[in-house]
Image (spheres, rainbow, N blue to C red):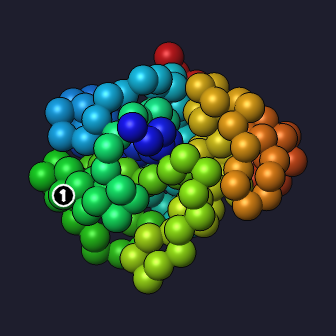
Amino acid sequence: MYTTYILLGSNLGNRIKYLSDAILEIEYKLGTISSTSSLYQTASWGKHDQPDFINQVIELKTSLSPAELLKAVLQIENDLGRQRLEKWGSRTIDIDILLYEDQIVNTSNLVIPHPYLSVRRFSLMPLSEIAPNLVHPISKKCITELLNELTDNLFVKKLT
């Protein structure tokens, strides 16, 4: 089994239900969720004229390869009504693979670690809650260090 960290986000409709539904689908289809962060209300990043997100990070144990995992999470997004109308636009569900073991993947449709992981507070805060000492395979810094060095000051508030 491989350990991967996945960011869930939603800023349309019943955001918490979309996250809950995504977790159920992930656990049913992709592997075992071994840890979940709290929920966080976060300002939108990249495109600011939209509703706040609810975000959460999960630790998943899976037998899927990174490419298989990507295909499966894209299908779950589709099943939960995700529509890709504009970059960084509002969405019912967003599922991002943040890290997969200590692997570095760089293909035309998949980059791991997630290319924006180390610059987004809404990713690092929930990840640091469940894996503070996890080391980023490129920067070689732990998640807590990356969070402490962060310049992103967008609103992020723990809900639960």
Q: Answer above or below: position of 70 versus 147.
A: below
Question: 5 or 41: nearer the eye?
Answer: 5
Instruction: Give how far across and how far down residue 27 sits, in percent.
Output: 25, 32
Mark 1 surroundings: few (<14), some (14-19) or many (≥20) residues within 10 A: few
Write down the residue under mark 1.
Answer: 75
Q: Quadrant of the N terminus?
A: top left
Q: How many marks?
A: 1
Residue at far top of view: 160
Q: Amino acid at mark 1?
A: Gln
Q: Secondary structure at mark 1?
A: helix
Q: Is residue 11 visible?
A: no
| 30 horizontally vs 88: left or right | left
Q: Is residue 105 visible?
A: yes
The quadrant in which residue 10 appears is: top left
| 118 horizontally vs 10: left or right | right
Q: Answer above or below: position of 41 versus 74.
A: above
Question: 63 or 143: nearer the eye?
Answer: 63
Residue visible at 17% across and 33% down in the picture: 28
Instruction: Give how far across and how far down residue 103 sits, in percent.
Output: 57, 57
Residue at far left of view: 79
Residue visible at 40% across and 76% down in the picture: 109
Q: Answer above or below: position of 85 versus 124.
A: below
Residue visible at 75% across and 53% down in the picture: 152
Question: 132 or 158: nearer the eye?
Answer: 132
Question: 159 or 63: nearer the eye?
Answer: 63
Residue visible at 44% across and 70% down in the picture: 110
| 4 horizontally vs 80: left or right | right
Q: Answer above or below: position of 110 versus 44.
A: below
Instruction: Give how far across and how far down residue 106 sits, in percent.
Output: 53, 75
